[in-house]
Image (cartoon, helix red, strand yellow):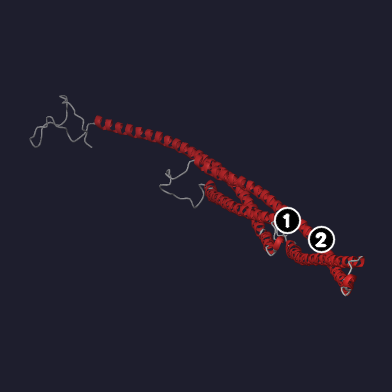
Amino acid sequence: MMSTENYEFDPSYRGQTGSSIGVSTVGFRSNKYNPNEWHENNYAKYYQTFQDRDESEKQRWQATRTENETLALSHQTQALSTKKLQQRLHDVNFWKFELNRMIEDVRNETDLLVAQKKRLTNALDATEAPLHIATESLANRDRRYGEDRVYDGVEVALMKEVEIINNVQNLLRQTIMTAEQQIRANRNAKQNLEMDWSNKYEASIADAKATNRRNEDVDIMFYPGVARHYDNQSTPESWAQNSHDNIVNGQNQLMASIQLRSLIDSILVDTARDMREQADVVETEFGKRIAEVSDAMQKMTYNMRETLKAIADNEKKIDMLRASIRAKEAPMKVAQTRLNDRRARPGIESCHDPAQDHLIGEVYQISQSIDSLTGELRETESNLKKLRDDHQVLVKEIEMKKNTLYIDQQKTMPIRMRYPTVQRFLGYNS
């Protein structure tokens, strides 16, 4: 290699002079090196190689240091990553446990609420029988007639019973709708909790798999582009807040469901008590009314017997009066015949003597007696007619009372024996 250095002209140069070609060499370098240049060139090479070896040694030492540092840093970073993954796995498992516990609580509470809703349905079904009994009782009592078709205490109690049962049915239907809404809310909360738990279950599997990765694994490989942040990723705070919100929602629905179950218990107890108490009122009123009608019928029966006796006595009296009137005919005939016989006295013998006065007085007295007896006969016959009319009225009244007693005692009271028990009103089948 030719040196590119510039050399000054040396006048003491002792080399070959002249040119075989006749061209001057002044100012031009010869194609040969002198010894100094040769030594200098060798020394330059020695120095360069020494310097390169020294740099190479320094670089190898630095590379070894860098290698050791990066290896330690890699081990440290990997260990820290493993620790972070373990911590994350611990957090995921913690929330999994909390979510699973809340899922079980909501599931159990929903089952209890479904059972309460079934009780409400049973109680609503149980109200159909008393409503039918009450309406049938009112329909039966509509077949009363006459003065017995009265708006009495039984009627009032039955109307009140129908009103109470209708109100109870409306309340139970509304409560069933509320229970169904709460059951849907519970199941929605449970679905959100289960979805969250399922996601965390998959995340725990992925994190556990990542945590157990080792450098010696045979299935590890390069995945270019995975070391980056994604726009749709959640933050640790939003991640924890999501599970917290799901659990809080589950707790809220849990408390609402517990309160609703307690309310359902109170409603069933209150409605069962109200219907049973009103049924007792109706039966008490029936008892009173039956006693009143029975007493009235007994009194009318007694009066009817006494009236029949009075009719018989009047009939006998009429016969006696008629006989008495007939008995006055002969004395009247005798007195009038005597007077007629004395009309045959002639002249001065036709005297208005005491006998004449007495006979005339006898005729008048007999006439008055007949008139008096006839008046008594008419009065007695009039009374007999009244008694017979009273007898007919009493017969009709007794028949009416019998009909009323039959309706209340034979038709209505037996169907009230089928009144459901309090257990049925509380929603239990037995």
Q: Residue furthest right?
A: 355
Q: Determine whether 270 is above or below 149 in the image.
A: above
Is residue 330 visible in this depiction of the protein? no
Image x and y of residue 224, in percent? 41, 48
- Provide residue 247's location: percent of width, then percent of height: 57, 44
Label 2: how many Cα within 10 Å (few below 14, some 14–19, many 20+): some
Binning the other alpha carbons within 10 Å of mark 1 as few (below 14), some (14 to 19) or many (20 upward) gives many
20 left or right, relative to 339: left
1 vs 2, front mark: 2
On the image, the x and y values in percent for residue 385 come to 78, 67
| Residue beneath disc 1 | 282
Q: Amino acid at mark 1?
A: Val
Q: Secondary structure at mark 2?
A: helix
Residue 309 location, quadrant: bottom right
Q: Which mark is residue 411?
A: none
Q: Residue at x 51, y 41 (%)?
A: 81
Most extreme residue toward the front is: 348
Front in this rendered view, residue 44 or 176: 176
Q: CA distance from mark 1 to mark 2?
A: 25 Å
Residue 2 visible at all: yes
In the figure, residue 359 lies in which quadrant?
A: bottom right
**What kind of element bears circle 1?**
helix
Residue pointed to by mark 2:
299
Who is closer to the viewer here, 6 or 286? 286
Query: Observer-nearest residue: 215 or 272?
Result: 272
Residue reaching furthest left? 22
Counting residues from the start of the chain, the first of labels 1 and 2 encountered is: 1
Given the image, on which type of amino acid does mark 2 rest? Lys
Instruction: From the viewer's perspective, tell me whether residue 368 is left or right of residue 281.
Output: right
